[in-house]
Amino acid sequence: MKKLIIYIIFVFVVGFSSYFSYGYYLSSKYADTAIPYMEEVLPQISTWDADIVRQYMAPEVLQTVTAENLKNLMAALSKIGELKSISKFSFQNEVSGDNVQFVGGTVITYEVEAEYSSGATVVTIRLLLRDDSYQVYHFNFQSQALAAS
């Protein structure tokens, strides 16, 4: 019985360690390229100008979003206010192959807490990696300023 408990603990520790090691590997795989890109893109998105945002979006995504819808979205998001600061980006996950709606790339997801004139906002950014370059695949803003609207 004692050996069984030790074995179960060993398997749990190895599994737990493997999970976090793999997560660290994935996050470090993109850190040198994705984070500088997002540090450039987030302030541009935060101008709330649909024409600027369109420049960073993946063409496949733009085919599903009309110019008017994007303009309305940016107008709604502008309630968050002016970007003041960005904290550390946190890697969330990587999806590639058959799990990506637009075949031919990898989608990586990061989350960051940013300070806007209306207060703290959690921003989720999904980037499409194709041919060693990034394009914005999706973004989401969670803010009390939006909840109050």
Image: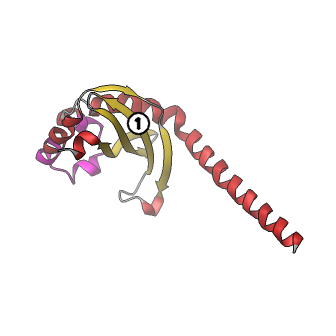
Based on the picture, tell me whether residue 108 belongs to the magenta stretch: no
| Magenta-drawn segment | 53-71
Residue at image x 21%, y 39%?
Answer: 77
Q: Quadrant of residue 87?
A: top left
Point out the residue furthest to the left here: 68
Vertical position of residue 22 compared to residue 123: above or below:
below
Q: Position of residue 47 (x, y in %)?
A: 23, 29
Q: Position of residue 105 (x, y in %)?
A: 43, 51
Magenta-drawn stretch, dominant element (helix, strand or loop): helix
Vertical position of residue 47 compared to residue 14: above or below:
above
Point out the residue furthest to the top here: 84
Vertical position of residue 12 compared to residue 30: above or below:
below
Based on the picture, tell me whether residue 68 belongs to the magenta stretch: yes
Point out the residue furthest to the bottom here: 1
Amino acid residing under circle 1: Glu
Q: Which residue is mark 1?
A: 113
Q: Position of residue 37 (x, y in %)?
A: 41, 32
Q: Nearer the viewer, residue 2 or 48?
A: 2
Q: Quadrant of the N terminus?
A: bottom right
Dot 1, crowdedness within 10 Å: few (<14), some or many (≥20)?
some
Left/right placement of residue 42 relative to residue 15 reads left
Left/right placement of residue 136 relative to residue 93 reads left
Q: Position of residue 50 (x, y in %)?
A: 18, 37
Q: How is the image coloured?
A: secondary structure
Q: Nearer the viewer, residue 2 or 81?
A: 2
Q: Quadrant of the C terminus?
A: top left
